[in-house]
Amino acid sequence: MNPNPNYLFKTRAYLVGAMSCADGSSWRSKVEQSLKEMGVIVLNPYNHPFVNSCQEDNDATNKLKKMIALNQYDEASAMTRKIRTEDLRCVDISDFIFCYLNPKVPTCGSYEELFESNRSKKPIFLSIDGGKKETPLWLFGTIPHKYIYDNVDDAIEMLKKIDNGTVAIDSERWRLLRKEFR
């Protein structure tokens, strides 16, 4: 049993995953709902928590693509820098990361956020579209495979088990805050 049941209560999770070539809202809605039921504060790039936040959704992605098509590189760079800064700040302030990757969708930002989370030793719940067997090889050298899930539902189920105390979160791998600091 987990010596600290309800570990996830009053923690912040950041939802990482491709947005540039695929609709990332459907899986995020499902995960956000489940996490909120566990008392987790969810940081979602579709609804950044910052004052004067930039828009980061499918419309913003389409706007960026249009800027690039029109050779408006300065504007696209400025907008992307703001998005990147906000996303990485969300990684900084989150307690754990829920990441969904589709290996067929090119995404630089998701990998940067994932690697930054790993360097910080934040718990990572990584769901790979197509299952663990589709995991990009580099990730097997980065994140132990036991933290890679075949689908979003399996990762959510593990979070529920950690939250209700039936599974202990790995405090050897991850740098976990004691309850009084959450």
Image (spheres, helix red, strand yellow):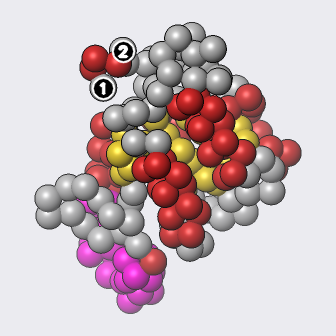
At horizontal 73% and vertical 57% (from top left) the residue drawn is 129
Q: Is residue 121 above or below residue 171?
A: below
Q: Position of residue 95 (x, y in %)?
A: 40, 32
The residue indicated by pointer 2 is 178
Q: Position of residue 86 (x, y in %)?
A: 29, 53
Identify whether 107 is placed above or below 67. Answer: above
Residue 34, position as x, y percentages in the image: 53, 52
The residue pinned by badge 1 equals 182
Which quadrant of the view contains residue 56? bottom left
Q: Nearer the viewer, residue 144 or 171?
A: 171
| Residue 72 on the magenta segment | yes
Residue displayed at 29% across by 44% down:
89
* Residue span colored magenta: 59-83
- Kindly check if marks 1 and 2 are in contact, taking CB atoms under 8 A apart as contact: yes
Identified by mark 2, the residue type is: Arg
Q: Amino acid at mark 1?
A: Arg
Q: Which residue shows up at 61% across the image and 53% down it?
A: 100
**Extreme left residue here?**
51
> Relative to the observer, which residue lies in front, 76 or 107?
107
